[in-house]
Amino acid sequence: MPSDTMHNIQAVIFDLDGVIVDTAQFHYNAWKTLASEWDYALKHEDNEQLKGVSRMDSVNKIAQWANVHTTTEQLLDVAHRKNEIYLNFCNQLTPEHVLPGIAPLIEALRASGVLVSLGSASKNARFVLDKLGLLDVFDVIVDGNDVSKSKPNPEVFLKAAHHMGVSPQDCVVLEDAPAGVEAALTANMKVIGLGDASELQKAHLVLDNAKNLSLGQLNQIKIKGVA
């Protein structure tokens, strides 16, 4: 009979926004500025639905909410201008903006021989990591430039596992968005949700943040269905 079994992990895949650094307000302010051009007042709950979603998918969502019918070229222009606004905000990032617990966790993982990867929908991931002083700590970086499907599609996480040479079931994903949790589960990976438990209840474990997260906790997450 299948049983719950503990299983030492080989790799941890980190989302970027909301896990390593909090840039949600940057995204929100940028999208809100552009949505106002369509006479749409973007709400915080709207922004929650954009977490982990690619830039173009986000533009299309906002256009639908605003009931705007426009050309692909115009949507691309909006996406480009949003990115410029967002990058201007990101220019102020420093290593001090890394969220609590993340840097020591990565250090502990690397010291224990556990691979670390980034799996993010952001096409600016390398720029942001460089600002945070974390560009060189990841064994693999997979971002929006490397995938064609955004979360909840599992492509970004499956590519990260593939490039690290590990099986999906040997990976743990750290996510802050429901779409990311769903993507990790679809990839047959364990997933820890960081943030609101009511939104991330499908994750194997939900924590307020990564402040006290340890390798021991990661290894204690049980995989269902393993004999």
Image: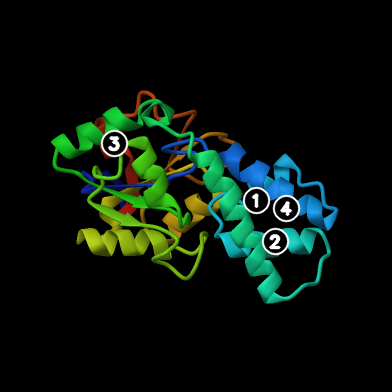
- Inspect this view and state whether residue 227 appears: no
In this view, 173 is above or below 58 = above
Measured as percent of width and height from the top left, residue 142 is found at: 35, 58
Q: List the residue tagged with mark 3.
A: 220
- Give SS at disc 3: helix
Residue type at mark 4: give it: Leu
Which image quadrant for residue 68?
A: bottom right
Q: Can you tell which of label 3 and label 1 is closer to the viewer?
A: 1
Q: Earlier in the sequence, mark 3 or mark 4?
A: 4
- Give SS at disc 2: helix
Q: List the residue tagged with mark 4.
A: 34
Please give the label number shown on residue 61: 2
Residue type at mark 3: give it: Gln
Measured as percent of width and height from the top left, residue 37 is found at: 80, 55
- Give SS at disc 4: helix
Residue type at mark 2: give it: Lys
The quarter in which the N terminus is drawn is bottom left
How far apart, in angstroms, are the residues tagged by discs 3 and 2?
38 Å
Q: Is residue 139 left or right of residue 33?
A: left
Q: Earlier in the sequence, mark 1 or mark 2?
A: 1
